[in-house]
Image: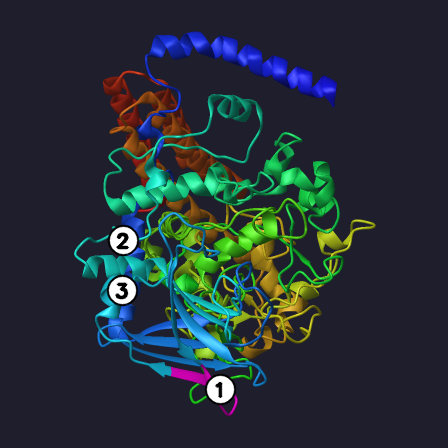
Amino acid sequence: MKIKALKLLTLVCLLIACALPVLFLSGRASSEPDPSLAGIGLGSLETFNTNYKAWEAEYLKKGGDQNMVLAMGWFKGLSTGNSYASGLAKFNLVEGNVSVAINGLSKDEGWDVWLVDSAAGRSISLESDDNMWRLGSLKHEGKVATLIASPGKDVFKTFDMDLVIVTKAGKNPIEDRTLIGTTSLFHRVYRSGQRGQFGVLADADPARTEPDKRGFFQRMIDTISPTASAQIGPVPNATTPLQQSIARGRLSFFNETFNGNGRTCGTCHRENGNLTIDAEFIDDLPPNDPLFVAEFVPALANNFENPVLMRKFGLILENADGFDNPASNFVMRGVPHTLALLQNTLTPVGPVPGATPNPDGSIPSQDGTTTPPNERTGWGGDGAPGTGTLREFIIGAIVQHYPKTLNRQAPGDFRMPTTGELDDLEAFQKSLGRRADLNLAAMQPKFKNEVVKKGVEIFNNGGSVLGGSDAGAGKCFFCHLNAGGSDFFFPGQNANFNTNVEGLPAQPADLVPGQLNPQDGGFGRNGISPTGGFGNGSFNTPVLVEAADTGPFFHNNSIETIEGAVDFYNSTAFNTSPGFGALIGGIKLEATEVVAVAALLRVINVLENERSARDLIDRIKIATSQAQAKELADLAVAEIDDAIEVLEGGGLHRPAQKDFAKARGNAQKAGSLANASQRITEANKALANLTTAKDDIIDP
């Protein structure tokens, strides 16, 4: 240990010796980083605004601030104990009325309801300077515990509520947090508009916009210690509050460890890897990358990851059904990308008309799941246990993947994020990817490849289900309307199905000797799936536009190619699945038809690569520094590389591949030039070559 420490100190001293002349000559303190490097990368303010407008329209349709509804339940990492109780808190913020109804709470104990306005910059775990207000006590009426209160319409003008908490009677939220409900980023943005300061959030942490205050020695250590941080690059003129929030969220997503084991969100969701990670990417990482903490941190050596299955197949260990008995209570899942988190991708299927609430207060949904979870996240659609929102998913990810020990306690193993950090992380994730689903029927005649055109026909053919022939009927649009995550039978909503992927024989992870790979039960923590594992056996419907370059496929990475993923729906496993296959009369595609559907998926993926690369290169033209230009160019090159690889894999559009290669060279050169005028020239060449490539694929 002494020798290693001496070597480290020597290296740091050498780095300091090299850096000091630069610091003195630069005339600026090293604690003042170039603010132009705080950009939003793959994020887009336009994408965020589109998602927000969709949410706002639905919110106003349901009554707006006269009917704000927060789901309440066990909150992974924040609740002080496990509970299966859940319910709803309904607010009329205009009149100042509140009603709370909870199912599943013990009648043998008393329960209080609190509202919390977190102090700016403070942990969501609650601290003494948070504004906590006891609303009243719940009273049992049969199976339901209720509270009706009228604090008055003036209260919510100044009380900016973040959390609703049910505690044991006589306890405050610092002492006990049995059930929790939280506001969403979009509601907080809406309320900022009501105050006349759209996008200025009450809990924004001023310290997060200040210069880096780490000591010089710590920053030097950081330069030689590998981290999971991704690019910190740029969108110029990030001056609006929301754009700044997205930029801060990106920095946090790729660089904030929350005082944990060194991992960040970007450890698994790599920005230059389509915000996911696979075995090929993992092969190129250094051995001390934080992804591999289970291999060099003794406290995480057992029951935290399976390094063999991670390295071979890109599978990550998830305690999706709780942390009790971690030696056997886990599943191995691939890393889903976080692109295109559109409103219809996250929205669950509506309730069964007239359904009676379950004993835990959840409402049965028409696809066999329940609400909550209120947003479909993770492979099972229940990635955030409890009320189930993207906001909670962030906290659950910290508890699952960031701890220093398996105690998973904060503080110590990690720290909890502040409300402002949650806002920023949510803002960044809702700014990623495309802004709307496609219209495949309108695109079909414009595609220039006959096989791709046939792919659209097969994709949109409903067969006998819609009164036609099952010959050449892919029936894909039933679950993936316009290749998105929305369902034909439940438009604008994301449905769960048991397609029996778990029933496939010879799954790669099952073939490795000595490695435990339990059955994955999918949605929910109750019951045993027909294919084994805790849950009802169903998984949510992923978007397909981004599929071709984000494989391997399915929740368990069991299929490597997009053609193989399409062919799965020919399989006995799918066509006898308990959740869907038998209901649509089965699918039987010939080999050429499988290729046609895969060709369609490849091409629409490439069109999205082209759109994203174009956006990044457009921003190179207004970059205020070479550092900005290089960051943008690197991301654009990654998108173009994906486009070329996806087309090559299907033998598609060879002229477009050549034009993409030219655009790649232009973009790379633009990022290397210090002269702004020369950068613009190269960026324009790249854009022209992108246009030529796109024109080979589809008519304008």
Residue 56 numbered mark, or none: 3
Kindly indicate the quadrant of the structure image that contains residue 664: top left
Q: Earlier in the sequence, mark 2 or mark 3?
A: 2
Residue 146 counted in the magenta span: yes
Relative placement, left or right, of 398 versus 202 is right
Q: Amino acid at mark 1?
A: Val
Q: Amino acid at mark 2?
A: Asn
Q: Mark 3: which secondary structure?
A: helix
Q: Amino acid at mark 3?
A: Glu
Q: Mark 1: which secondary structure?
A: strand
Label 2 neighbourhood size at 10 Å, few (<14), some (14-19), many (20+)?
some
Of all residues, the one furthest to the right in this rendering is 514
Where does label 1 land, which residue? Answer: 144
Q: CA distance from mark 1 to mark 2?
A: 39 Å
Give the residues in magenta.
138-147
Nearest the viewer among 113 and 699 is 113
Query: Relative to residue 476, is residue 341 depicted above or below?
Result: above
Residue 239 numbered mark, or none: none
Q: Are marks 1 and 3 in contact (CB under 8 Å)?
A: no
Where does label 2 land, which residue? Answer: 49
Measured as percent of width and height from the top left, residue 551 is found at 56, 48
Relative placement, left or right, of 187 versus 182 is left
Residue 191 counted in the magenta span: no
Name which residue lies at 67% across and 31% down.
287
Tell me if I can see residue 72 in this picture.
yes
Of all residues, the one furthest to the left in this rendering is 196
Nearest the viewer among 367 and 569 is 367
Tell me if I can see residue 652 in this picture.
no
Q: Nearer the viewer, mark 1 or mark 2?
A: 1
Measured as percent of width and height from the top left, residue 628 is found at 34, 27
